[in-house]
Image: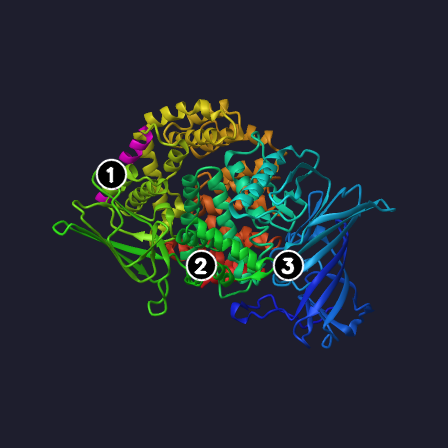
Amino acid sequence: MTSSTPLGTASTTVRLADYRAPAWTIVDAALVFDLGRESTVVEATLQLRCDVPGAPLRLDGEELELLEAHLNERALGPDDYRMDAAGLEVFATQHLERATLRTRVRIAPASNTRLEGLYVSGSLLLTQCEAEGFRRITFFIDRPDVQARWHTTLRADAAHYPVLLGGGDRLSQRVLDDGRHEAVWHNPHPTPCYLFALAAGPMARVSKSLVGADGRHVELNVWVEGEDPEPCRYALGAVERALRWDEQRFGRCYDLGVFNVVAAQDFTMGAMENKGLNIFNARYILADEHTATDADFMGIEAVVGHEYFHNWSGNRVTLRDWFQLSLKEGLTVFREQEFVADLHSRDLKRIEDVRLLRARQFSEDSGALAHPVRPSEYREINNFYTLTIYEKGAEIVRMLHTRLGEAAFRAGMDRYFAENDGRCATLEDFFAAHTLATGVDCTDMLAWYAQAGTPVLAVTRSFDQAAGTFTLVVRQQPLAAPKAAKPLPIPFRVALYGASGQVLGAPLHSSAEQCAGAWLLKEAEHVLVWHGVQAEPLPVFNQGFSAPVRVHFAHSTTEQARIVSVERDGFARWDALQALSLCAMTQRAESTSPEAEQAEWALSEAMGALLKDKAAHPAFLAECLALPDFDTLADAVACIDPLALLAARDGLLHRLATAHQPRLGALYAAMASQAGGGLDDASMSARALRHACLSWLARIDDGALALSHWQSARSMTERLAALKALLHANGAAASAVLKAFSDEFADNALVTDKWIALVATRPHASALDDVLDLMRGPFWVPSNPNRVRALVGSFARSNPTAFHRADGAGYRFVAERIADIDAINPQVAARSLAAFESLPRWAPTYQGRAREALHALASSPRSRDVAELLERLRN
């Protein structure tokens, strides 16, 4: 029975200021699933406690068919409850302190294209409940501050679903009389329903048993659909590495007897940290050297680590409300970054993270979709799984680490976990724990969560040779209206280099306090003064990217080039090359100017010196050869003329490749032997440099070297590098090579995604025609998020040449695909709109054509996911 009066509307705005603790909470949840592809029946027995006397009992539920309901063993009739599209309200509970509610509902997994709740992926039944998917499984109080202990019984046809996995530890399994079987799982740790999970179907696994640092015996399993689990073996090793690292670095031990991971071909996100049963996008699990690249292996290690680390930073300590999302995601990204840095190279990992931050998060922070790390309100929480929440949130945690130092930060983390274990925490709880553990008041860091935008530090210098003083004045430019904004606490690293490359000591006078090798800037202006300076030194700022800020300082091109040669910090050396590149490109895009010529000359000289440096790490050289991409370039200008910027970038790369062709060729050849190795860091570094050289050389030899590389390639890393170089250089053999490659891997969805993404990102306006051809064939699967990202997402976010076509066809194509996908999976559709986030800064002609496309998209009803972002883009 459906009421015409909703309990909550889809467009309701949720505000942080309105938070109230739940009136009712669920202490224990016992679920029984009779699983089926077309129809699944879920019986839920909930033990409830009323914490606000007289409060009504309301539960969330969407697209559920209610079969029966009982309150304290009494069957409820039509007059005992009210149900609508948003949930269920049970009457006659006003005088109860405790209650038992039992409901039976029917759901249709095969019809669930949103991939939220219980859905079908191939021959599997899987769940995805974060953020609000559990309400599509059964009626529940679906909010993160309602934590229950879970007892889950799974029943299914044994032939179709031979493996039944649930969250927690398995208590029992048995064969039933009717061809079905049953497995019972129990999670003893109180957890919110967004961490519920099940997986059922024909799966195979790789396993390892170990003993944790606390003496607990733990079985690690990584599962995949079908009969061949060998591609899961690298992921299994990554789970073990993550477990051991968390024991050693943070003192966190695993708390169940089994840790299960399942690879899913259909998955909206990257992975999900459900308690004891992680479900992953298959691209972050399945890998061997024949089908996966070095980047894939590194991505698997990082994402496996991320989800495993959530067991403490997200599960054992979870969120009070969704406004605290960065408390688990930003903190866990930081932990993931440290994991990878400790296992491999800290400098290279920092460069990788900052490259992403500048290319995408800075743009997000300055665009139409900008929002604070902790927004004050939202309409659709799925729209806030953004780089701001994850990457900027991680940078705030990193600043805290920089401010306190490793030992004090660890003490703060220990106290945070100890005081909040089993609780729903807030950002205030996090910083309070660090304050109490260290005696350093860290609560001022909360200001970072309240403001959107990237802070700017404007630095000026003066040198008084007669007095022997060198002065730096650092001014923090306000993000909001000057009267309302307060300066943010910023740990800022500064180094001065003398004429012979020596590092000068710390300033004798400073208005900023020192913290763990950085200066803590807390005021609008700070002055640093060095005495006894005989010659004007070279200042270098923000080594290691100590703070996520833009630094405005008038370095000359000569000074930037000198930083590359004298600086000891790998990130700062790379950053100086990036700055020279940006100067050369942006100046060239606006006009041919002396500044552009000087920057290009200095860049070429610095690059030449690096290429000749036999001591340089190959992977570091590869990073230096990767000049700023279009997104980073666009973020550096006030008004974005896409085609002018692209022409400047392509022209610079062509001239640099021509100037350094001999050395690039020599390095390409020199790396051949080491590049033939396996998955060790040295071999992967050699391949990275070899392929960076190949990418540059393909610009000037029409793909001849790329074809030779293809013919000798053995691994997927080598083959894909050759194919990309051929396609993007429009090499004569590109079509034949692509046909052979696509035919060979026609049955491998993940490899198919790879070559489709290469076609979609070919930097030519005609790439749109290729994309349209693919959409007319069997490769277009709009219900599969990976395929949508490979084709539409890659085109929109990684092919600015075709996306920004002068005729506006690229904009129309993306808007039309968003409309189609919105009817299938609103989350995937909404995230595709991020391609338009910098729209307000596009040149007027481009803006006009894009707004026409978005207006057409908004002209018909849309999901609340897409509607909210469209409104923000069009304002």
Tell me the distance, in whole angstroms, between the alpha carbons under discs 2 and 3. 29 Å
Q: Going 38% across and 29% down the picture, which residue do you hit?
A: 697
Q: Going 67% across and 37% down the picture, which residue do you hit?
A: 207
Please determine whether, in this image, residue 252 is positioned above or below residue 237: below
Residue closer to the observer: 849 or 271: 271
Which quarter of the picture shows residue 663?
top left
Magenta span = 592-612
Which secondary structure, mark 3? loop
Residue 463 position, x and y percent, is: 17, 51
Residue 90 position, x and y percent, is: 73, 71
Residue closer to the observer: 120 or 825: 120
Instruction: Kindly identify which residue carries mark 1.
Output: 501
Q: Is residue 602 magenta?
A: yes
- The tag on residue 370 is 2
- The tag on residue 192 is 3
The residue at the far right in this view is 177
Sequence-first tag of 1 and 2: 2
Tell me the distance, in whole angstroms, between the alpha carbons under discs 1 and 3. 56 Å
Q: Is residue 742 magenta?
A: no
Residue 322 position, x and y percent, is: 56, 61
- Determine crowd level at label 2: few under 14, some 14-19, many 20+ residues with C-alpha closer than 10 A: many
Q: Are marks 2 and 3 in contact (CB under 8 Å)?
A: no
